[in-house]
Image (tube, rainbow, N blue to C red):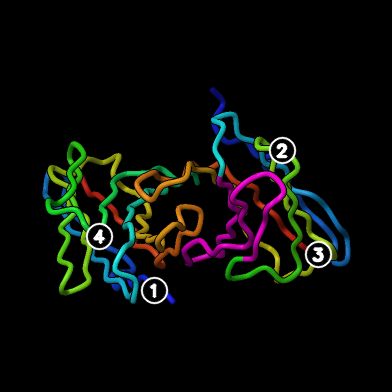
Amino acid sequence: AQKITQTQPGMFVQEKEAVTLDCTYDTSDPSYGLFWYKQPSSGEMIFLIYQGSYDQQNATEGRYSLNFQKARKSANLVISASQLGDSAMYFCAMNPPRGAQKLVFGQGTRLTINP
Amino acid sequence: NAGVTQTPKFQVLKTGQSMTLQCAQDMNHEYMSWYRQDPGMGLRLIHYSVGAGITDQGEVPNGYNVSRSTTEDFPLRLLSAAPSQTSVYFCASTNRGGRTEQFFGPGTRLTVL
């Protein structure tokens, strides 16, 4: 069975600072995908970034990057130059091989950006 | 494209009542899923479908039924609502292939009294 662990229930960061949100995972499958989603207070789920288990390079999408350390089974999200609009819940998730429809989520980290 | 739509946005039920949460997508995605989100927790998979006529159980399927008669629609039925089913329900869709993210609907907030 797959499992995602997010150990930071809440984080507080000053605007314009970089922030790292931790995510560790557990799986016995050699092939898997890792995702990060943002959930603002309005409730919708917004896809941020994807990392495949066989990808050689860390994924990047604008201000978001994924620090993928396969041996340590970690997939931390890095947000550079944080903005007030980054305040939200952030969820790490993974899917098994041929399981794009079966995401397993962590409990989330609530990020608050202070002006 | 509207993406993934869900109705209703809010619903209050009494214990024992039944209802159907509607979900539709216009992206011609093969895969659709239902998740529930309880306070302070991540999303948990209820049921999923890999195509019309094909459904399977996720992590927390008890008390829910699904069917998939068309590619576009994937309704979730609560057979006899219980207070433990008070939650926010999300429908999602995606294409075959692990590199594609799931697209989520706006969610339905359900309260069972």
Q: CA distance from mark 1 to mark 4?
A: 15 Å
Instruction: Give the mark, 1 or 4, whose residue is nearer the N terminus.
Output: 1
Give neighbour class at mark 3: few <14, some 14-19, many 20+ (Cα, 10 Å): many
Give neighbour class at mark 2: few <14, some 14-19, many 20+ (Cα, 10 Å): few
What secondary structure predominates along the stretch shown in magenta? Answer: strand
Residue stretch rendered in magenta on the structure: B31-57
Give neighbour class at mark 1: few <14, some 14-19, many 20+ (Cα, 10 Å): some
Q: CA distance from mark 2 to mark 3?
A: 26 Å
Q: Which quadrant of the rendered structure holds the C terminus of chain A?
A: top left
x and y percent of residue B9 in the render? 67, 41
- For discs 1 and 3, the disc positioned in front in the rendered view: 1
Identify the subunit bearing mark 4. A
- Dot 1 corresponds to which residue? A3
Identify the subunit bearing mark 1. A
Q: CA distance from mark 1 to mark 3?
A: 29 Å
Q: Residue at x 35, y 55 (%)?
A: A90
User: Helix, strand, or loop for circle 4?
Assistant: loop
x and y percent of residue A71 in the render? 15, 73
Is B42 contained in the magenta span? yes
Q: Amino acid at mark 4?
A: Ser
Which residue is more in the foreground, B109 or B80? B80
Q: CA distance from mark 3 to mark 4?
A: 40 Å
- Dot 3 corresponds to which residue? B81
Q: CA distance from mark 1 to mark 2?
A: 32 Å
